Amino acid sequence: MKLPAVKGTRDFYPQDMAIRNFLLDGWKAASLRNGFQEYDAPILEHLKLFQIKSGNEIVEQLFSLTDRGGRDLALRAEITPSLARMVNQRINTLPKPIKWFSLPRLCRAERPQRGRLREFFQWNIDIIGADSVLADAEVIFCAIDYLRQVGLTAKDIVVRISSREILAAVLEQEGIKKNNLDALYNLLDKRAKMPADKFAGLLLKNVPETKRRDKITQLMDAKSLDELSAFIEPASQAQEPMNELKRLFELLEIMGVGRFCEFDMGIVRGLDYYTGVVFEIYDRESKLRAIGGGGRYDNLLKLFGGPSLPATGFGIGDCVLQILLEQKGLLGKPAEKPPDYFLARADRKYLDQTVELAAKLRQAGSSAVFSYKSASLGKQLRQASAQQALNTIILGEELENDQLVIKNMDTGEQRLVQKKHFLEKIAPRKQSKNS
Amino acid sequence: MKLPAVKGTRDFYPQDMAIRNFLLDGWKAASLRNGFQEYDAPILEHLKLFQIKSGNEIVEQLFSLTDRGGRDLALRAEITPSLARMVNQRINTLPKPIKWFSLPRLCRAERPQRGRLREFFQWNIDIIGADSVLADAEVIFCAIDYLRQVGLTAKDIVVRISSREILAAVLEQEGIKKNNLDALYNLLDKRAKMPADKFAGLLLKNVPETKRRDKITQLMDAKSLDELSAFIEPASQAQEPMNELKRLFELLEIMGVGRFCEFDMGIVRGLDYYTGVVFEIYDRESKLRAIGGGGRYDNLLKLFGGPSLPATGFGIGDCVLQILLEQKGLLGKPAEKPPDYFLARADRKYLDQTVELAAKLRQAGSSAVFSYKSASLGKQLRQASAQQALNTIILGEELENDQLVIKNMDTGEQRLVQKKHFLEKIAPRKQSKNS
């Protein structure tokens, strides 16, 4: 009987794992150089945690279960609720602003599609406790810093940026009631993904008044910050967020990533909890789903039983990103590090010395491999090449004089060394404590 | 409303995450230098996969669920079944021997206890396709190589080694029927954990004959390979595995880890699928549960619908290991890397230049942080110290002459540099493709 992997999940054979590590190691490095600290939460949470404020779509797609103790649990489909839970638990002792990142494994029981799987990895960056637009700029810069570092240029990707707060203020200014906003956000968020007449029909249901509808359509068509400004009345609540949005673009320019960023009124984000700047990252050709997205969510901690604390962050998944990097030829062939040494024995009688030397090399921190079978020396040398070993050490009759033959596999150069000197020269292993 | 984490799971705040990374990064480094390649499988598998050959204890303790498609799924409590599935899927194309490692997140719905949690991480090493005792030696060496590298000595830990194959052969030689072996293994495995009279009572149920029972008790009391040899008749099936076990200890001696290893007939392992060498790693004082264990399981791939291929491996969890390292003072305070640069501004008017410099440093691969608030310079310098920044760059009136003040936080030395020269000197970021 042969069992397949669960639908929508992936097996990571070493070459797949090398790609996953390439992505996640890059996320981690970018996070660290931008001053973020790593955290993680359990993959299982109480189902209730996700019912507080995740979008309906997310709750419906949770893998959930009841454990033997009768607890309703679910596999996390996003890490933000866990983050809110953890921060609230230590709200008084954590120094602010909190700059954290995580690389969670997430599960979502949705229909598997290109770029959307049932198990995936996501890069999450969050800044909690800073209301400055500087924090929004840092978050967006950090995403671009990574994407640029793996080789993507402003010709490949674009960060589309808008502001929920401006949208809310203008909609309210136009007479839309506060409790109608969430439904409207959801509709406006999907505008680009549906035909114009379908959108018009749905908008009609939400906003019966023709004049208001026209105004909303015009607003959503705003192509620049200047065009957007024209909608904002002098005493409007939208003035302050408008100034912040302008400052955000200014900061991104100063940080050298202005050409990656564009204003786009159509960016609304599906989740209810965004309160300010929102953004999504796309391939320029818009052939793929969003690479990632995020924004400001100043009310979230409070919704989870904590204090009111400003927050901003993003999530970037591995699936769409991997497709894009493959398309652009930027994945190369990430490979695990080849072994430093392949130990070949000229005769089976040198097996014990081979084993001993391998152990010593490893203890000194070098990677060393050898064949279990005492094949011919030629065959072992071919194995060394196949494994892309950096050096091959040949253990043969030279051992009678305590000597080893070391072959540099790159240059082909062979040299005879005294075994004792060679072992002395191997760098002693670094202390790893506190490293 | 405040929700706790699910019982038996852990939140990883940055300082906890640093410890987890310290453990897992060490596992990974040891795996790579011993010639293993990383793989992973989905955290969700078909429930059936675990019903094939995991021990009953494991199946009972699975977190299982039925998805909307009616599929019975479970969270993995071990990765070996997934490994067998993956290897069988590509059995014809994977070069042998397969030397793979994994660092899976595992879940088990058991009663949380010290060293045993409902969510944990486990280091798994497996060699598939090599029947040589060299492979068993490499697996055990690899575990010790890691444990020794984090500072544990032969005074702290011991690898207790035995052989299921010898046990089976001697038991059969004494007249125990093959289909009674599994129940007997389970009992013998628990011998050290129960009072002698309780064990005697349970053994009586399994083996009614007094003579046989005495022989089994004597066998299990064998304290050395020589004592064990005395039980083995010249034509016994146990002769070959006995020679292998001797050779295993010889190899471990050659590899320089002999003093970590001891023969112990009491090591049987609970899982049914072991077929040869078995071992468990303990703290010398035996105050904790096993740190890890493993052995040879030559029939497993076949049980999962594949061919008959020899295999050997181990698993080491993070929970007991962490407790032991803490007790021995070997955990230190693993910390994320401190920032390379803290950028302090002498006046708020230098904010934009601060932001610009931070972006440039990050793009060049250095980590750089700054405060969102324009606090006094003194306060910013205290923040730099609190974050253990390696250097602080002060942006002040020196900028009028295009100069920066760079303070080495370790030595306290301050120097004035031309901004232009400083930026030119920062190492250009390395190409990460194919890295």
Image: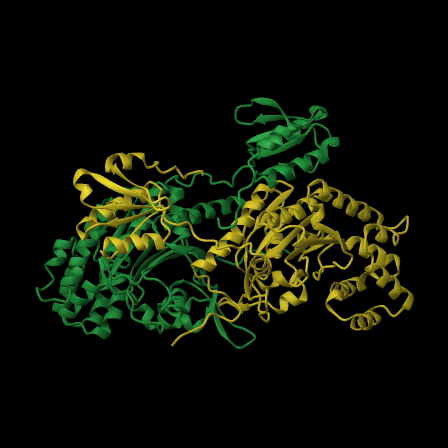
Chain colours: A green, B yellow
Viewer-side residue, B236 vs A289? B236
Q: At 41% from the left edge and 71% from the top edge, which residue is drawn?
A: A49
List x then y, in percent, for residue B251: 73, 42
Viewer-side residue, A113 vs B256? B256
Q: How many marks?
A: 0
- Residue B148 visible at all: yes
Q: Is residue A43 above or below residue B24?
A: below
Taking A351 as reference, is B84 left or right?
Answer: left
Task: Quadrant for residue B289, please give it.
Answer: bottom right
List x then y, in percent, for residue A392: 60, 29
- Residue A291 visible at all: no
List x then y, in percent, for residue A65: 51, 71
Viewer-side residue, A126 vs A158? A126
Taking B126 as reference, is B381 left or right?
Answer: left
Viewer-side residue, A100 vs B296? A100
Q: Is residue A337 above or below residue B20?
A: above
Q: At 70% from the left edge and 36% from the top edge, which residue is drawn?
A: A373
Task: Quadrant for residue B326, please give it.
Answer: bottom right
Q: Is residue A352 above or below residue A7?
A: above
Taking A116 as reference, is B161 left or right?
Answer: right
Taking A70 as reference, is B339 left or right?
Answer: left
Q: At 58% from the left edge and 48% from the top edge, which residue is drawn?
A: B101
Quarter of the rendering occupied by the N terminus of chain A: bottom right
Q: Residue furthest left?
A: A234
List x then y, in percent, for residue B364: 33, 40
